Amino acid sequence: MNPVVNVPPTMSTLDRFLFSFFNPDIAGRYWKAIAEGFVTTTWLGVTVIITGLVVGLALAVARAQHVKPLNFCIIVFADVFRALPPLVIIIILFFAFPYIEMAMSAFTATWLSLSLVLAAFAEEIFWAGILAVPKGQWEAARSTGMSRLETLQHVVLPQAVRMTVPPLTNRVMAITKGTALGSVVALHEILNVSSSASSESGNATPLLVGACAYLILFIPFVWFGRWIETRFAWKR
Amino acid sequence: METLLTVFFNVEIMKKVWPFLLQGLGMTVVLSLVVIPLGLAGGLGIAILSSLQRRWLNRVLIVYVDFFRAFPPLVLLIFIYFGFPFLQIDLPKFAAVALGFFLNTSSYFGEIFRAGFESIPRGQLEAARSTGLTRWQALVSVVIPQATRNVLPDLISNTLEVIKLTSLASVVALPELLNNARQAQALTYNATPVVLAALMYLLLLWPIVRLLSRLEHKSIALH
Amino acid sequence: MKQDLPPILELKGLVKSFGALQVLKGIDFSVQPGELAFIIGPSGSGKSTLLRCCNRLEEPDGGSVTVDGIDITAPGVDINRLRQKIGMVFQSFNLYPHMTALGNVTLALRKVQGMDKATADAKGRAALERVGLTDKADAYPNQLSGGQQQRVGIARSLALEPLIVLFDEPTSALDPELVGGVLKVMRELRESGMTMVVVSHEMAFARAAADRVVFMDQGQIVEQGPPEEVFGNPKHARLREFLATLADRH
Ligand SMILES: Nc1ncnc2c1ncn2[C@@H]1O[C@H](COP(=O)(O)OP(=O)(O)OP(=O)(O)O)[C@@H](O)[C@H]1O
Ligand SMILES: [Mg+2]
């Protein structure tokens, strides 16, 4: 997909610029498709956040049971999915798994990849939070007869999760932005829809509309992150 | 099991595509070596400028940082790569990729350094100035070293992200590791090249991931 | 104190090591119902480890720990159920910072005993009343002084109606002016008949309130007896030395 520039040759520079980037006709033609992409991106992001955080938390809780072989597996999982670029995982799931009869849709491949990556990072963050809760908290709770799991649930996790909010917010945002990688496997999310609209029309306006869609989606996220950071500054 | 081996870990194919992937790895390394120092320098610049506490300047910096953190890096890359021709600017592929990554990376590093600067008590700067150091000297020899140490885990973590980020250059067919692996996959009708590329990424990045885990747990233990 | 009844807590040949370091070298020790046993000894002599073995926060390596006739180290015992009967008060309070005083006191009632909130709250308030903190039920730990926090810590144990409460240096982390309030609560607790084992350096409290003072050194009980005897007529050189260093400090 090489960019084809479709501009009337007689135009002045400013007119060419406006025609290419702020073209109301083109915007009108494609905004609906981009809006659908917006819905896909949002839905993908929400499912990734939920799956990733739930799996990450479950893994951290499992790790707190101190079962050696299980912990080894969790650490390997977390290491691998933190080290691999998400795009590599998406491409393996989408293009390589069909070779072993495990084809999946572009949505599934992107969702699964990003969820695994978020789960890996979330596990590490939750685990660091659990470790940061002083040992005395465990001892106090255990001495009143609470089990390991009850202590984790009522005493340790509420404190750990609070500490993890700022780093988790940043990580969730970074990985949710990875939904744009779905465009590589032709998932019709914002980037895919707007860049194919752009090459189809030979005009950059759809790209600009897509960019605005991303800003609408993620700027509140960035602001939320800033607010969180000042509220719960994680003391190092 | 049989098919799994021939399709994912085919030794014949590994041998054949190895040099081509190695070439790609070279490009990945070069790209990282260009983007990381630029991003660090840009980020440090942002932090230094915002430590000047000029109101209008800070607003501009915050807009810059928030803007480029809000964009998915791939969107930035596509926008630059496909958008610039409309401005009749002919940017070489490598430059387009590096520019896109720089905008993203410098804003992340900027935020990290800014947090680092804020972690240094004002007294440090004042003590340095009281011994006659200029503002710049105090910054270079007192504030920056301490700030860097305080946010070292975050700096390393973001460096890891930047190296992973370079895989996005495959989308505009810059011949880095993932791009070459995908080409090899298309030519051999076999998943082995991509799996091999994944292993190469793992080998390259796993030590950084380990280091990070240790640093993070240590910093919490200290606290 | 009831001498003729079976002991509430009984340790026999208790042994505990950390790696190569043997911290408890065969401790025999028992506490009668209503008794206040006061443990003293130099730093590192194993006092905390001894207490922590009594509710298995540390696993003993050998010997037995019997609480109210039940060997708590036996395989298959429900240690969580037994721990409710063995209160523990920590040097660093260890209050849950995300819960109010009442929340701290009622957590185990609600989550382990499955008590409904109203009953648990009533019990929790009664426990807070015993430590003189009725008005602080809704305060969070960071809104309380150290002395108040420690009293909440005591109430947290009392709410479970324990048979015995173990105190590990309950006043060591407190500013001097806050120590008195905590000791007063402990005294009242003793007068109400609670069985207590106290590790502390508050010798005046020991003289006034302890039934028995136990001197530990290097993982062994070296000497024990009524406070006037242990303090007034120490037999072992090591105890005399220890008491002398304490006197120098004050
Ligand atoms: N978890 C542990 N791992 C290794 N060694 C330990 C551990 N807990 C205690 N020890 C060691 O066991 C010995 C006894 O410790 P303990 O805390 O029981 O002493 P203590 O009499 O309570 O001293 P203090 O008056 O300082 O509180 C010390 O040498 C200590 O270093
Ligand atoms: Mg101790």
Image (cartoon, helix red, strand yellow):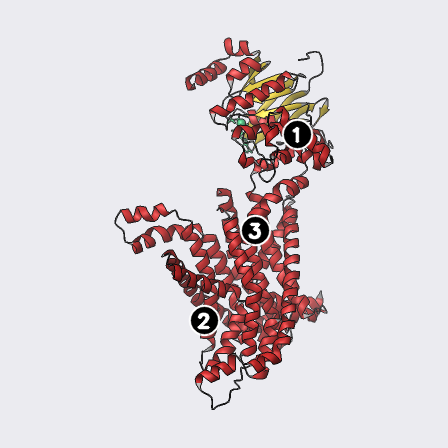
Residue position for label 1: C125
Q: Chain of mark 2?
A: B
Please report the residue visible at 56 percent of the width from the left and 68 percent of the height from the top: A214
Q: Nearer the viewer, residue A193 or B109?
A: A193
Q: Position of residue A26 (x, y in %)?
A: 58, 81
Q: Quadrant of residue A154?
A: top right
Work out whether residue B9 can be spotted. Answer: no
Please report the residue visible at 48 percent of the width from the left and 72 percent of the height from the top: B97
Q: Position of residue B212 (x, y in %)?
A: 51, 53
Q: Nearer the viewer, residue C35 or A113?
A: C35
Residue type at mark 2?
Leu
Residue position for label 2: B99
Label 2 packing within 10 angstroms: few (<14), some (14-19), many (20+): some
Report, in whole angstroms, how far the alpha carbon at label 1 lies from the one at label 2. 64 Å
Report, in whole angstroms, how far the alpha carbon at label 3 lies from the one at label 2. 32 Å
Q: Quadrant of residue C164?
A: top right
Q: Name the residue furthest bottom.
A: A10
Which disc is residue A165 wearing? 3
Check the image and report above or below for A128 versus C247.
Answer: below
Residue type at mark 3?
Val
Q: Position of residue A118 (x, y in %)?
A: 60, 58
* SS for callout 2: helix
Q: Position of residue C209 (x, y in %)?
A: 57, 15
Q: Nearer the viewer, residue C160 or C229?
A: C160
Q: Is residue C200 left or right of residue C53?
A: left
Work out whether residue A47 can be spotted. Answer: yes
Q: Dots 3 and 2: beta carbons under 8 Å?
A: no
Residue type at mark 1?
Arg
Which disc is residue C234 wearing? none
Q: Chain of mark 3?
A: A
Of tags 1 and 2, the one toward the viewer is: 1
Q: Nearer the viewer, residue C242 or A170?
A: A170
